[in-house]
């Protein structure tokens, strides 16, 4: 539940809230349409880790039916996940890092049908990554920390840290501006 607290605190931090979030606020956030799908995937993850497969699958299917987001309980997802909209989203990555933002209609998955969830065929998403609406990240590729994937981009090769991937197929360019290469603005 530590990751769920991190998710909710990031959400409220993005809205300008400073400091720790109360327990009552954490509970109420689970009913927010932007946080409820994250809470459901955290419950699925919780039960999967404890080998309660049927309950994990239940929460995973509830996410599909109610919010239109497909996330396997096997995906390793860091804290601070933000899903502003979820409809049509498929998160079939091997791993998603901390503090990632994933927009609607995103597909993270394999280049071939994979019914057994083969981790070696799935993308690995770094920390602090932003993935725009409709983007597709396909195959065993790595998206580095602080990278950005543009809306509707089709990413078929690795994206280095602090890079921007746009287009079909995606071309990659370094990010520009303060903080783009790891330094902070003065």
Image (spheres, rainbow, N blue to C red):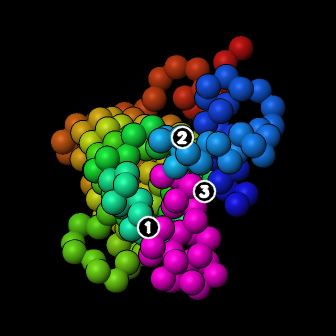
- Principal SS element in the magenta part? helix
Q: Residue 157: horizontal and vertical position, in percent?
A: 31, 54
Q: Position of residue 45 (x, y in %)?
A: 56, 69
Please determine whether, in this image, residue 89 is positioned above or below residue 54: above
As drawn, is 10 to the left or to the right of 44? right
Residue 106 highlighted magenta (yes or no): no
Residue at (44, 67) in percent of width and height: 60
- Judged from the image, the secondary structure of the residue bearing numbered disc 1 is helix
Give the residue displayed 47% in from the left and 23% down from the top: 176
Q: Quadrant of residue 150?
A: top left
Q: Callout 2: helix, strand or loop? A: loop
> Of marks 2 and 3, which one's residue comes earlier in the chain?
2
Q: CA distance from mark 3 to mark 1?
A: 17 Å
Q: Residues within 10 Å of mark 3 (few under 14, many from 20)?
A: some
- Quarter that holds the C terminus: top right
Q: Which residues are magenta?
A: 37-59
Q: Name the front one of labels 1 and 2.
A: 2
Q: Earlier in the sequence, mark 3 or mark 1?
A: 1
| Residue 55 belongs to the span the image colors magenta | yes
Q: Position of residue 54 (x, y in %)?
A: 48, 82
Q: Are marks 3 and 1 in contact (CB under 8 Å)?
A: no
Between disc 1 and disc 2, whose residue precedes? 2
Q: Kindly identify which residue carries mark 2.
A: 32
Residue 145 visible in the displayed image: no
Quarter of the image where the N terminus is located: bottom right
Residue at label 3?
Answer: 78
Dot 1: within a 10 Å radius of its alpha carbon, few (fewer than 14), some, or many (20 or more) residues?
many
Mark 2 Cα shell of 10 Å, populated few (<14), some (14-19), many (≥20): few
> Of all residues shown, which one is farthest toward the top?
186
Identify the residue under disc 1: 60
């Amino acid at each position: 539940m530590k990751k769920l607290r991190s998710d909710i605190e990031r959400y409220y931090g993005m809205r300008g809230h400073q400091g720790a979030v109360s327990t009552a606020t954490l509970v109420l956030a689970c009913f927010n349409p932007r946080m409820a799908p994250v809470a459901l995937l955290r419950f699925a993850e919780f039960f999967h880790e404890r080998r309660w497969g049927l309950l994990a699958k239940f929460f995973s299917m509830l996410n599909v039916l109610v919010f239109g987001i497909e996330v396997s309980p096997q995906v390793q997802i860091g804290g601070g996940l933000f899903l502003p909209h979820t409809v049509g989203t498929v998160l079939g990555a091997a791993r998603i890092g901390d503090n990632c933002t994933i927009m609607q209609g995103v597909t993270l998955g394999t280049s071939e049908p994979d019914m057994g969830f083969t981790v070696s065929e799935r993308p690995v998403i770094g920390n602090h990554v932003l993935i725009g609406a409709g983007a597709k990240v396909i195959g065993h590729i790595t998206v580095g920390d602080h990278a950005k994937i543009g809306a509707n981009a089709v990413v078929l090769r690795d994206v280095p840290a602090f890079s921007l991937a746009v287009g079909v197929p995606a071309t990659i360019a370094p990010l520009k501006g303060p903080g783009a290469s790891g330094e902070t603005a003065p």
